[in-house]
Amino acid sequence: MKRSLLLAALGLAACGRYSDFQLAPAGPVESGHYEWSPHTGAIYREQAIDTLNPSVLAWHGSLLNLYSVYDGKTWHTATATSSDGLTWTGTQRILSPDPKTWEGDYIAANGAAVLWRNQLLYLYQAGSPPRIGISRSDDAKTWRKDPSPVVDFGPRGAWDERATADPYLFISGDRLYLYYLGEDRARRQRLGVAASDDGTRWTKLRSSPVLELGEENAFDENGLGEPAVWQAHGSYWMLYTGRARNEVRRLGLARSTDGVQWRRTGLVIEGSEPWNSKVMCDPTVIVEPDRVRVWYGGGDVAHPAENVHGQLGYGELIWKP
């Protein structure tokens, strides 16, 4: 028995650091709920098969969007800028997968860009099966990738043994937190969290996953992914993508007081127009006093990956006390 425990501990050590942690208290919990207010029509699409995975943040007096473009063969990361979050210009491709490295022919991410200690950090997933890497920039134009993944597979039998993907960066205090998708050997896709002081060395929460699959016939019974996390009204909040059995994707909302233990609020956001009727995914958020601004990917084909006629959409979560 002791030998088995020792081997298990060595297996965990070989696959990264693990710890028990929580985020700082989010403040006095306020009573209330969010209501979804959609913007009519898609707001952006490149001349490509799919435009998905937005990651929007404030940058030098405007908004910067790092998003994914699929040209029919390969995914790339591009940037655009906007003064209002609805009209985007200045498209520039900044990252492509390097087939000579661990990335293979795939690169994508959603919501994974932050300004951290005067430097832009962008976490992305690459490879097949995917793992999470990091790229850095001082000007949003020239990017430097680390040579190896920063969040690798978990040990044998772990909830993220087969894949780590869908990174979302969240800053709390002086630490970075990474919410991400993990896939186990049964191909269950759930959500977990890791913490870091520099974006390169990550410590995974020992008790992950933090959000399990939905119940039978629920909108998220077939898989979870693409989390977006923020703090407001005395709580932490998470928008995430849920995959139904028929691969229609919708957004769900969960709430937490410590960033680790989450409960679903019951809000489910589905597409209300033809262009996003089958897919709502990849949320990224900016929090303002009276609203949470949400950018997301949408499509009209029920499929878990590409070829969904992907476009970027926008909506707002309005707080109702």
Image (tube, rainbow, N blue to C red):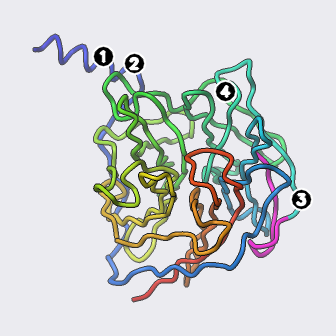
Mark 3, residue position: 90
Looking at the rendered structure, which numbered label has been put on residue 103?
A: 4
Residue kind at label 4, given as amino acid type:
Glu
Which residue is located at x 74 percent, y 22 percent?
Answer: 99
Q: Kindly report which numbered mark, 4 or 2, lies closer to the viewer in this rendering.
A: 4
Q: If you read the primary sequence from the N terminus, does the residue marked by circle 1 or circle 3 appear first?
A: 1
Q: Quadrant of the C terminus?
A: bottom left
Where is residue 9 shown, x and y percent of the image? Answer: 26, 20
Nearer to us in this view, 71 or 171: 71
Looking at the rendered structure, which numbered label has been put on residue 10?
A: 1
Q: Quadrant of residue 150?
A: top right
Q: Quadrant of the N terminus?
A: top left
Nearer to us in this view, 144 or 292: 292
Q: If you read the primary sequence from the N terminus, does the residue marked by circle 2 or circle 3 appear first?
A: 2
What are the residue bounds of the magenta stretch?
A: 77-88
The stretch drawn in magenta includes residue 106 = no
Nearer to us in this view, 181 or 8: 181
Inter-mark Cα distance, 4 to 3: 27 Å
Inter-mark Cα distance, 2 to 1: 6 Å
Label 1: element kind: helix
Residue kind at label 3, given as amino acid type:
Gly
The stretch drawn in magenta includes residue 86 = yes
